[in-house]
Image (cartoon, rainbow, N blue to C red):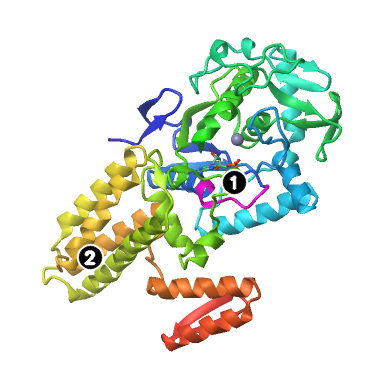
Amino acid sequence: MSFHVHNSLTRRLEPFASLEPGVVRMYNCGPTVYNRPHVGNYRAFLFADTLRRWLEYRGYRVEQVMNITDVGHLTDDGDEGEDKLEKQAKKEKLDPWEISRKVAAQFFADLGALGVTPAKAYPKASEHIPEMVEIIEGLLAKGHAYEAHGNVYFDVKSFPSYGKLSGNRVDELDAGARIAVREDKRNPEDFALWKSDPAHIMKWDTRFGPHGFPGWHIECSAMARKHLGDRLDIHTGGEDNIFPHHECEIAQTESFTGQPFASYWMHSKFLQVDGGKMSKSLGNTYTLDDVAAKSYTPRQLRFALIRGHYRAPLNFTWDAMKDAASSLENLDDLVLRLRRAAKGEGAADAQAGMELVVAARREFEAGMDDDLNVSRALPGLSGLRAAALEGKFGAAAAEQALAFVADANRVLGCIAVDEELLPADIEALIERRQAARKARDFKESDRIRDELLAKGIVLEDTPKGVVWRKK
Ligand code: AMP
Ligand code: ZN
Protein backbone atom coordinates (compact mmCIF):
# COMPACT_ATOMS: atom_id res chain seq x y z
CA MET A 1 0.00 0.00 0.00
CA SER A 2 1.25 3.48 -0.78
CA PHE A 3 0.91 6.26 1.80
CA HIS A 4 -2.75 6.76 2.66
CA VAL A 5 -4.14 9.52 4.86
CA HIS A 6 -7.46 10.15 6.51
CA ASN A 7 -8.81 13.32 4.95
CA SER A 8 -11.16 15.19 7.29
CA LEU A 9 -12.68 16.86 4.24
CA THR A 10 -13.96 13.62 2.71
CA ARG A 11 -13.94 11.62 5.97
CA ARG A 12 -12.18 8.85 4.07
CA LEU A 13 -8.80 7.20 3.85
CA GLU A 14 -7.25 8.37 0.58
CA PRO A 15 -4.01 7.62 -1.27
CA PHE A 16 -1.67 10.57 -0.88
CA ALA A 17 -0.59 12.44 -4.01
CA SER A 18 1.02 15.87 -4.02
CA LEU A 19 0.10 18.61 -6.47
CA GLU A 20 3.71 18.93 -7.62
CA PRO A 21 5.54 15.62 -7.96
CA GLY A 22 8.15 15.14 -5.24
CA VAL A 23 7.20 18.23 -3.21
CA VAL A 24 4.71 18.57 -0.37
CA ARG A 25 3.49 21.95 0.80
CA MET A 26 2.16 21.67 4.32
CA TYR A 27 0.75 24.23 6.72
CA ASN A 28 0.33 23.46 10.42
CA CYS A 29 -1.72 25.61 12.76
CA GLY A 30 0.74 26.58 15.46
CA PRO A 31 0.47 27.92 19.00
CA THR A 32 -1.28 30.99 20.28
CA VAL A 33 1.59 32.44 22.26
CA TYR A 34 -0.12 33.71 25.40
CA ASN A 35 1.04 30.86 27.61
CA ARG A 36 3.73 28.26 27.26
CA PRO A 37 2.32 25.43 25.10
CA HIS A 38 1.37 22.35 27.11
CA VAL A 39 2.04 18.73 26.28
CA GLY A 40 -1.41 18.50 24.62
CA ASN A 41 -0.38 21.19 22.14
CA TYR A 42 2.81 19.23 21.56
CA ARG A 43 0.75 16.19 20.63
CA ALA A 44 -0.57 18.26 17.70
CA PHE A 45 2.86 19.67 16.81
CA LEU A 46 4.64 16.30 17.09
CA PHE A 47 1.99 14.76 14.85
CA ALA A 48 2.89 17.41 12.25
CA ASP A 49 6.60 16.65 12.74
CA THR A 50 6.07 12.90 12.37
CA LEU A 51 4.01 13.47 9.23
CA ARG A 52 6.74 15.62 7.77
CA ARG A 53 9.40 13.04 8.64
CA TRP A 54 7.35 10.23 7.10
CA LEU A 55 6.88 12.19 3.86
CA GLU A 56 10.65 12.69 3.78
CA TYR A 57 11.19 8.97 4.35
CA ARG A 58 8.94 8.43 1.31
CA GLY A 59 11.20 10.71 -0.73
CA TYR A 60 9.31 14.00 -0.73
CA ARG A 61 10.84 17.40 -0.14
CA VAL A 62 8.55 18.99 2.41
CA GLU A 63 7.91 22.71 2.54
CA GLN A 64 6.49 23.04 6.01
CA VAL A 65 5.17 26.20 7.63
CA MET A 66 3.83 26.55 11.16
CA ASN A 67 2.37 29.86 12.24
CA ILE A 68 2.61 31.71 15.51
CA THR A 69 -0.67 33.34 16.52
CA ASP A 70 0.18 36.52 18.42
CA VAL A 71 -2.97 38.58 17.92
CA GLY A 72 -6.67 38.15 17.16
CA HIS A 73 -7.35 34.76 18.77
CA LEU A 74 -10.31 35.53 21.02
CA THR A 75 -11.30 33.51 24.05
CA ASP A 76 -14.36 31.98 22.33
CA ASP A 77 -12.38 30.92 19.21
CA GLY A 78 -14.81 33.08 17.22
CA ASP A 79 -15.72 36.77 17.17
CA GLU A 80 -16.45 37.24 20.85
CA GLY A 81 -14.42 37.47 23.99
CA GLU A 82 -11.07 38.95 24.84
CA ASP A 83 -7.90 38.64 22.83
CA LYS A 84 -6.03 35.78 24.54
CA LEU A 85 -2.75 37.69 24.47
CA GLU A 86 -4.19 40.91 25.84
CA LYS A 87 -6.03 39.04 28.59
CA GLN A 88 -2.80 37.34 29.66
CA ALA A 89 -0.89 40.63 29.39
CA LYS A 90 -3.28 42.26 31.85
CA LYS A 91 -2.92 39.32 34.20
CA GLU A 92 0.88 39.48 34.13
CA LYS A 93 0.95 43.29 33.95
CA LEU A 94 3.07 43.07 30.83
CA ASP A 95 2.84 44.40 27.30
CA PRO A 96 1.18 41.80 24.99
CA TRP A 97 4.18 42.06 22.66
CA GLU A 98 6.41 41.13 25.58
CA ILE A 99 4.22 38.08 26.33
CA SER A 100 4.35 37.01 22.70
CA ARG A 101 8.16 37.30 22.55
CA LYS A 102 8.59 35.44 25.84
CA VAL A 103 6.23 32.58 24.98
CA ALA A 104 7.49 32.21 21.41
CA ALA A 105 11.03 31.83 22.80
CA GLN A 106 9.81 29.12 25.19
CA PHE A 107 8.02 27.41 22.32
CA PHE A 108 11.17 27.27 20.19
CA ALA A 109 13.20 25.97 23.12
CA ASP A 110 10.59 23.25 23.68
CA LEU A 111 10.62 22.31 19.99
CA GLY A 112 14.41 21.97 20.18
CA ALA A 113 14.22 19.83 23.31
CA LEU A 114 11.62 17.58 21.67
CA GLY A 115 13.81 17.09 18.61
CA VAL A 116 11.33 18.66 16.19
CA THR A 117 12.73 19.21 12.70
CA PRO A 118 12.53 22.97 12.08
CA ALA A 119 9.89 24.10 9.58
CA LYS A 120 10.83 26.33 6.65
CA ALA A 121 9.13 29.27 8.38
CA TYR A 122 7.31 30.16 11.60
CA PRO A 123 5.44 33.27 10.50
CA LYS A 124 3.87 35.56 13.07
CA ALA A 125 0.36 36.85 12.43
CA SER A 126 1.24 40.42 13.48
CA GLU A 127 3.89 40.56 10.75
CA HIS A 128 1.41 39.70 7.97
CA ILE A 129 -1.17 42.47 8.22
CA PRO A 130 -0.74 43.71 4.57
CA GLU A 131 -1.18 40.15 3.29
CA MET A 132 -4.42 39.82 5.28
CA VAL A 133 -5.72 43.18 4.09
CA GLU A 134 -5.02 42.15 0.49
CA ILE A 135 -7.27 39.09 0.83
CA ILE A 136 -9.94 41.08 2.67
CA GLU A 137 -9.96 43.71 -0.10
CA GLY A 138 -10.27 40.94 -2.69
CA LEU A 139 -13.20 39.41 -0.82
CA LEU A 140 -14.90 42.81 -0.56
CA ALA A 141 -14.41 43.40 -4.28
CA LYS A 142 -15.92 40.02 -5.13
CA GLY A 143 -18.92 40.51 -2.85
CA HIS A 144 -17.92 37.83 -0.33
CA ALA A 145 -17.41 40.34 2.47
CA TYR A 146 -18.97 43.57 3.72
CA GLU A 147 -17.98 46.42 6.01
CA ALA A 148 -19.92 47.55 9.06
CA HIS A 149 -18.58 50.24 11.42
CA GLY A 150 -14.91 49.38 10.93
CA ASN A 151 -15.59 45.64 11.08
CA VAL A 152 -15.37 43.47 7.99
CA TYR A 153 -17.38 40.27 7.91
CA PHE A 154 -17.34 37.29 5.59
CA ASP A 155 -20.79 36.58 4.17
CA VAL A 156 -21.14 32.81 4.60
CA LYS A 157 -24.16 32.72 2.31
CA SER A 158 -21.85 33.82 -0.53
CA PHE A 159 -19.95 30.55 -0.24
CA PRO A 160 -22.45 27.74 -0.82
CA SER A 161 -20.13 24.96 0.38
CA TYR A 162 -19.58 26.60 3.78
CA GLY A 163 -19.74 23.68 6.22
CA LYS A 164 -18.15 21.07 3.95
CA LEU A 165 -15.30 20.37 6.38
CA SER A 166 -17.14 20.32 9.68
CA GLY A 167 -20.49 19.07 8.44
CA ASN A 168 -22.15 22.13 9.99
CA ARG A 169 -24.78 23.59 7.71
CA VAL A 170 -25.50 27.29 7.76
CA ASP A 171 -29.23 26.74 8.17
CA GLU A 172 -28.61 24.41 11.08
CA LEU A 173 -26.05 26.49 12.94
CA ASP A 174 -27.76 27.58 16.07
CA ALA A 175 -27.65 31.35 16.28
CA GLY A 176 -26.70 32.30 19.80
CA ALA A 177 -25.17 28.96 20.74
CA ARG A 178 -21.69 28.72 19.18
CA ILE A 179 -22.35 31.88 17.25
CA ALA A 180 -23.03 35.20 18.85
CA VAL A 181 -25.69 37.28 17.16
CA ARG A 182 -24.44 40.76 16.38
CA GLU A 183 -26.52 43.53 15.03
CA ASP A 184 -24.10 44.53 12.35
CA LYS A 185 -23.91 41.04 10.79
CA ARG A 186 -26.09 40.11 7.82
CA ASN A 187 -26.28 36.50 8.97
CA PRO A 188 -25.49 35.38 12.52
CA GLU A 189 -23.04 32.81 11.10
CA ASP A 190 -20.93 35.45 9.32
CA PHE A 191 -17.48 35.74 10.84
CA ALA A 192 -15.07 38.63 11.28
CA LEU A 193 -12.18 39.15 8.91
CA TRP A 194 -11.25 42.43 10.55
CA LYS A 195 -12.43 43.93 13.80
CA SER A 196 -12.52 47.40 15.17
CA ASP A 197 -11.95 48.11 18.84
CA PRO A 198 -10.42 51.33 20.20
CA ALA A 199 -9.53 49.52 23.44
CA HIS A 200 -7.47 46.86 21.71
CA ILE A 201 -3.73 47.27 22.40
CA MET A 202 -2.35 45.53 19.31
CA LYS A 203 -4.06 47.44 16.53
CA TRP A 204 -3.50 48.79 13.04
CA ASP A 205 -4.66 51.84 11.13
CA THR A 206 -6.16 50.80 7.78
CA ARG A 207 -8.77 52.22 5.49
CA PHE A 208 -11.36 50.26 7.54
CA GLY A 209 -10.57 52.47 10.52
CA PRO A 210 -7.80 53.51 12.92
CA HIS A 211 -8.22 50.80 15.59
CA GLY A 212 -8.40 47.51 13.73
CA PHE A 213 -7.04 44.02 14.24
CA PRO A 214 -7.44 40.80 12.26
CA GLY A 215 -9.77 37.88 12.85
CA TRP A 216 -7.94 34.70 13.81
CA HIS A 217 -9.02 32.75 10.70
CA ILE A 218 -7.80 35.26 8.09
CA GLU A 219 -4.34 35.12 9.65
CA CYS A 220 -3.78 31.50 8.66
CA SER A 221 -5.24 32.02 5.16
CA ALA A 222 -2.81 34.90 4.62
CA MET A 223 0.28 33.26 6.11
CA ALA A 224 -0.30 30.00 4.20
CA ARG A 225 -0.67 31.92 0.94
CA LYS A 226 2.40 34.10 1.55
CA HIS A 227 4.73 31.23 2.42
CA LEU A 228 3.32 28.31 0.41
CA GLY A 229 1.14 29.73 -2.35
CA ASP A 230 -2.58 29.58 -3.16
CA ARG A 231 -2.83 25.81 -2.90
CA LEU A 232 -1.58 23.45 -0.21
CA ASP A 233 -1.19 19.72 -0.18
CA ILE A 234 -1.81 19.30 3.54
CA HIS A 235 -3.24 21.50 6.27
CA THR A 236 -3.14 20.20 9.84
CA GLY A 237 -4.40 21.15 13.27
CA GLY A 238 -5.92 19.69 16.39
CA GLU A 239 -9.50 18.40 16.20
CA ASP A 240 -10.88 21.62 17.72
CA ASN A 241 -9.56 23.58 14.73
CA ILE A 242 -12.05 21.97 12.34
CA PHE A 243 -14.77 24.42 13.32
CA PRO A 244 -14.82 27.34 13.14
CA HIS A 245 -11.14 27.93 12.32
CA HIS A 246 -10.52 25.69 9.33
CA GLU A 247 -14.05 25.93 7.98
CA CYS A 248 -13.58 29.71 7.83
CA GLU A 249 -10.09 29.45 6.33
CA ILE A 250 -11.53 27.35 3.49
CA ALA A 251 -14.36 29.82 2.86
CA GLN A 252 -12.03 32.82 2.70
CA THR A 253 -9.20 31.31 0.70
CA GLU A 254 -11.36 29.47 -1.83
CA SER A 255 -13.59 32.52 -2.36
CA PHE A 256 -10.47 34.64 -2.91
CA THR A 257 -8.48 32.29 -5.17
CA GLY A 258 -11.34 30.42 -6.85
CA GLN A 259 -9.37 27.20 -6.28
CA PRO A 260 -9.42 24.39 -3.71
CA PHE A 261 -7.28 25.41 -0.71
CA ALA A 262 -5.76 22.20 0.69
CA SER A 263 -6.03 18.72 -0.84
CA TYR A 264 -5.84 16.99 2.55
CA TRP A 265 -7.02 18.23 5.93
CA MET A 266 -5.60 16.22 8.80
CA HIS A 267 -6.58 16.62 12.45
CA SER A 268 -5.02 15.06 15.52
CA LYS A 269 -7.14 14.05 18.49
CA PHE A 270 -6.81 15.87 21.76
CA LEU A 271 -4.53 14.71 24.50
CA GLN A 272 -6.72 14.08 27.51
CA VAL A 273 -6.22 14.21 31.27
CA ASP A 274 -8.35 11.89 33.36
CA GLY A 275 -10.54 11.30 30.31
CA GLY A 276 -11.20 15.04 29.71
CA LYS A 277 -9.57 17.66 27.51
CA MET A 278 -6.18 19.06 28.52
CA SER A 279 -6.51 22.80 28.10
CA LYS A 280 -5.08 26.01 29.46
CA SER A 281 -8.54 27.31 30.27
CA LEU A 282 -9.33 24.25 32.43
CA GLY A 283 -6.02 24.58 34.28
CA ASN A 284 -5.17 20.89 33.94
CA THR A 285 -2.12 21.29 31.74
CA TYR A 286 1.44 20.03 32.02
CA THR A 287 4.47 21.69 30.48
CA LEU A 288 7.88 20.23 29.69
CA ASP A 289 9.08 21.50 33.07
CA ASP A 290 6.38 19.47 34.85
CA VAL A 291 7.54 16.43 32.92
CA ALA A 292 11.18 17.11 33.82
CA ALA A 293 10.21 17.54 37.48
CA LYS A 294 8.97 13.94 37.36
CA SER A 295 12.38 12.95 35.99
CA TYR A 296 11.26 12.24 32.44
CA THR A 297 13.27 13.52 29.51
CA PRO A 298 11.85 15.35 26.47
CA ARG A 299 12.89 12.34 24.40
CA GLN A 300 10.69 10.08 26.53
CA LEU A 301 7.84 12.57 26.29
CA ARG A 302 8.19 12.68 22.53
CA PHE A 303 7.86 8.92 22.40
CA ALA A 304 4.85 8.94 24.74
CA LEU A 305 3.08 11.47 22.52
CA ILE A 306 3.77 9.91 19.12
CA ARG A 307 3.63 6.20 19.80
CA GLY A 308 -0.14 5.91 19.40
CA HIS A 309 -2.18 6.70 16.32
CA TYR A 310 -2.77 10.45 16.05
CA ARG A 311 -6.50 9.88 15.63
CA ALA A 312 -6.80 7.57 18.63
CA PRO A 313 -7.61 8.91 22.09
CA LEU A 314 -4.58 9.36 24.33
CA ASN A 315 -4.78 9.93 28.05
CA PHE A 316 -1.84 11.64 29.74
CA THR A 317 -0.93 9.93 33.01
CA TRP A 318 2.35 9.38 34.82
CA ASP A 319 1.77 5.64 34.42
CA ALA A 320 1.56 6.13 30.67
CA MET A 321 4.83 8.13 30.82
CA LYS A 322 6.48 5.34 32.77
CA ASP A 323 5.30 2.77 30.28
CA ALA A 324 6.51 4.85 27.33
CA ALA A 325 9.89 5.37 29.00
CA SER A 326 10.37 1.68 29.54
CA SER A 327 9.34 0.80 25.95
CA LEU A 328 11.79 3.38 24.67
CA GLU A 329 14.51 1.91 26.87
CA ASN A 330 13.86 -1.41 25.13
CA LEU A 331 14.38 0.22 21.76
CA ASP A 332 17.64 1.80 22.99
CA ASP A 333 18.63 -1.64 24.21
CA LEU A 334 17.84 -3.08 20.77
CA VAL A 335 20.48 -0.77 19.32
CA LEU A 336 23.07 -1.90 21.88
CA ARG A 337 22.38 -5.56 21.21
CA LEU A 338 22.52 -5.11 17.45
CA ARG A 339 25.84 -3.29 17.79
CA ARG A 340 27.25 -6.23 19.70
CA ALA A 341 25.89 -8.68 17.15
CA ALA A 342 27.37 -6.59 14.35
CA LYS A 343 30.77 -6.97 16.05
CA GLY A 344 30.37 -10.72 15.77
CA GLU A 345 29.00 -11.44 19.23
CA GLY A 346 25.76 -12.86 17.76
CA ALA A 347 24.92 -15.86 15.59
CA ALA A 348 27.83 -17.55 13.85
CA ASP A 349 26.22 -17.29 10.41
CA ALA A 350 26.65 -13.63 9.38
CA GLN A 351 23.46 -13.77 7.28
CA ALA A 352 21.33 -15.21 10.09
CA GLY A 353 18.22 -13.13 10.79
CA MET A 354 18.30 -11.25 7.47
CA GLU A 355 14.69 -12.19 6.68
CA LEU A 356 13.61 -10.80 10.07
CA VAL A 357 15.02 -7.41 9.15
CA VAL A 358 13.18 -7.40 5.83
CA ALA A 359 9.93 -8.30 7.59
CA ALA A 360 10.46 -5.66 10.30
CA ARG A 361 10.98 -2.92 7.73
CA ARG A 362 7.91 -4.06 5.85
CA GLU A 363 5.82 -3.97 9.02
CA PHE A 364 7.09 -0.53 9.99
CA GLU A 365 6.38 0.91 6.54
CA ALA A 366 2.93 -0.69 6.32
CA GLY A 367 1.97 0.87 9.67
CA MET A 368 3.22 4.34 8.74
CA ASP A 369 1.65 4.18 5.27
CA ASP A 370 -1.65 3.40 6.96
CA ASP A 371 -2.46 6.99 7.91
CA LEU A 372 0.66 7.34 10.04
CA ASN A 373 -0.33 4.57 12.40
CA VAL A 374 2.76 4.55 14.62
CA SER A 375 1.25 1.94 16.93
CA ARG A 376 0.95 -0.43 13.95
CA ALA A 377 4.51 0.38 12.86
CA LEU A 378 6.31 -0.10 16.18
CA PRO A 379 5.90 -3.86 16.49
CA GLY A 380 8.33 -4.06 13.57
CA LEU A 381 10.98 -2.71 15.94
CA SER A 382 9.94 -4.55 19.09
CA GLY A 383 9.90 -7.80 17.10
CA LEU A 384 13.55 -7.21 16.23
CA ARG A 385 14.39 -6.78 19.90
CA ALA A 386 12.74 -10.08 20.77
CA ALA A 387 14.89 -11.75 18.11
CA ALA A 388 18.01 -9.91 19.31
CA LEU A 389 17.42 -11.14 22.86
CA GLU A 390 17.45 -14.66 21.49
CA GLY A 391 20.74 -13.96 19.70
CA LYS A 392 19.26 -14.59 16.28
CA PHE A 393 21.34 -12.05 14.32
CA GLY A 394 24.60 -12.66 12.53
CA ALA A 395 26.99 -9.76 11.92
CA ALA A 396 25.78 -8.84 8.42
CA ALA A 397 22.08 -9.03 9.38
CA ALA A 398 22.75 -6.96 12.50
CA GLU A 399 24.32 -4.26 10.29
CA GLN A 400 21.18 -4.29 8.14
CA ALA A 401 18.98 -4.14 11.22
CA LEU A 402 20.96 -1.16 12.55
CA ALA A 403 20.50 0.61 9.23
CA PHE A 404 16.75 -0.01 9.44
CA VAL A 405 16.53 1.24 13.04
CA ALA A 406 18.41 4.39 12.02
CA ASP A 407 15.95 4.94 9.13
CA ALA A 408 12.95 4.32 11.39
CA ASN A 409 14.42 6.75 13.88
CA ARG A 410 14.68 9.48 11.27
CA VAL A 411 10.89 9.32 11.52
CA LEU A 412 10.44 8.63 15.23
CA GLY A 413 13.27 10.88 16.39
CA CYS A 414 13.61 9.43 19.87
CA ILE A 415 15.70 6.25 19.88
CA ALA A 416 19.27 6.78 21.08
CA VAL A 417 20.97 5.51 17.92
CA ASP A 418 24.01 7.76 17.74
CA GLU A 419 25.29 8.51 21.18
CA GLU A 420 26.91 6.22 23.62
CA LEU A 421 23.92 5.23 25.67
CA LEU A 422 23.19 6.28 29.18
CA PRO A 423 20.63 4.51 31.31
CA ALA A 424 17.40 6.51 31.44
CA ASP A 425 17.70 7.31 35.15
CA ILE A 426 21.08 8.97 34.59
CA GLU A 427 19.78 10.93 31.62
CA ALA A 428 16.88 12.09 33.78
CA LEU A 429 19.25 13.21 36.55
CA ILE A 430 21.26 15.27 34.07
CA GLU A 431 18.01 16.89 32.89
CA ARG A 432 17.02 17.67 36.43
CA ARG A 433 20.36 19.27 37.18
CA GLN A 434 19.95 21.45 34.10
CA ALA A 435 16.51 22.51 35.29
CA ALA A 436 17.87 23.30 38.76
CA ARG A 437 20.69 25.39 37.29
CA LYS A 438 18.23 27.24 35.10
CA ALA A 439 16.17 28.00 38.19
CA ARG A 440 19.44 29.13 39.91
CA ASP A 441 18.98 26.44 42.54
CA PHE A 442 22.71 25.76 42.82
CA LYS A 443 22.41 23.74 45.99
CA GLU A 444 20.18 21.23 44.22
CA SER A 445 22.30 21.27 41.09
CA ASP A 446 25.47 20.53 43.12
CA ARG A 447 23.70 17.76 44.97
CA ILE A 448 22.71 16.11 41.67
CA ARG A 449 26.26 16.51 40.36
CA ASP A 450 27.53 14.59 43.39
CA GLU A 451 24.87 11.94 42.95
CA LEU A 452 25.97 11.47 39.34
CA LEU A 453 29.61 11.32 40.38
CA ALA A 454 28.72 8.52 42.77
CA LYS A 455 27.23 6.70 39.77
CA GLY A 456 30.47 7.18 37.81
CA ILE A 457 29.34 10.06 35.60
CA VAL A 458 31.41 13.25 35.51
CA LEU A 459 29.73 16.43 34.29
CA GLU A 460 31.62 19.30 32.75
CA ASP A 461 30.14 22.69 32.05
CA THR A 462 31.63 23.96 28.81
CA PRO A 463 30.81 27.07 26.78
CA LYS A 464 28.84 24.76 24.45
CA GLY A 465 26.76 23.35 27.28
CA VAL A 466 27.08 20.39 29.61
CA VAL A 467 29.07 17.36 28.51
CA TRP A 468 29.41 14.16 30.44
CA ARG A 469 32.02 11.39 30.57
CA LYS A 470 32.49 8.21 32.48
CA LYS A 471 34.83 8.47 35.46
P1 AMP B 1 -3.65 27.05 20.57
O1 AMP B 1 -2.36 27.45 21.21
O2 AMP B 1 -4.81 27.01 21.51
O3 AMP B 1 -3.93 27.88 19.34
O4 AMP B 1 -3.47 25.55 20.07
C1 AMP B 1 -2.39 25.13 19.27
C2 AMP B 1 -2.65 23.75 18.71
O5 AMP B 1 -2.74 22.77 19.76
C3 AMP B 1 -3.97 23.63 17.93
O6 AMP B 1 -3.74 22.88 16.75
C4 AMP B 1 -4.89 22.90 18.88
O7 AMP B 1 -5.84 22.16 18.19
C5 AMP B 1 -3.91 21.99 19.61
N1 AMP B 1 -4.37 21.55 20.95
C6 AMP B 1 -4.87 22.32 21.94
N2 AMP B 1 -5.15 21.58 23.04
C7 AMP B 1 -4.81 20.30 22.73
C8 AMP B 1 -4.86 19.03 23.42
N3 AMP B 1 -5.29 18.92 24.67
N4 AMP B 1 -4.41 17.94 22.78
C9 AMP B 1 -3.96 18.03 21.51
N5 AMP B 1 -3.89 19.17 20.80
C10 AMP B 1 -4.30 20.29 21.39
ZN1 ZN C 1 -4.61 28.37 12.06
* Circle 2 Cα neighbour tier, 10 Å, few/some/many (<14 / 14–19 / ≥20): many
- For image coordinates 44% across by 42% down, the residue present is 60
> Is 268 a magenta residue?
no
- In the displayed structure, 352 sits above or below 355; it is below
In the picture, residue 7 is in which quadrant? top left
Real-space CA distance between mark 1 and mark 2, rounded to the nearest whole angstrom: 46 Å
- For image coordinates 42% across by 22% down, the residue present is 10
> Is 35 a magenta residue?
yes
Check the picture and name the quadrant holding the C terminus.
bottom left
Determine the quadrant in which ligand 1 lies: top right
Q: Which residue in the structure is indicated by mark 2?
A: 398
As drawn, is 313 to the left or to the right of 435?
A: left
Give the structural element (helix, strand or loop) at label 1: helix
In the rendered image, residue 464, in percent from the top left (x then y), is placed at: 60, 74
- In the displayed structure, 299 sits above or below 18; it is below
Identify the mark at residue 153; answer none if there is no mark: none
Q: Amino acid at mark 2?
A: Ala
Q: Earlier in the sequence, mark 1 or mark 2?
A: 1
- Label 1 beta carbon less than 8 Å to ligand 1: yes
In the rendered image, residue 245, in percent from the top left (x then y), is placed at: 59, 29
Q: Which residues are magenta?
A: 34-41
Choose between 93 and 27: the one closer to the eye.
93
- Whether residue 380 is visible to the viewer of this picture, yes or no, is yes
In the rendered image, residue 246, in percent from the top left (x then y), is placed at: 56, 28
As drawn, is 407 to the left or to the right of 343?
A: right
Q: Which residue in the structure is indicated by mark 1?
A: 280
* Circle 1 Cα neighbour tier, 10 Å, few/some/many (<14 / 14–19 / ≥20): some
Choose between 251 and 352: the one closer to the eye.
251
Q: Amino acid at mark 1?
A: Lys
In the rendered image, residue 415, in percent from the top left (x then y), is placed at: 38, 62
Q: Residue furthest right?
A: 210
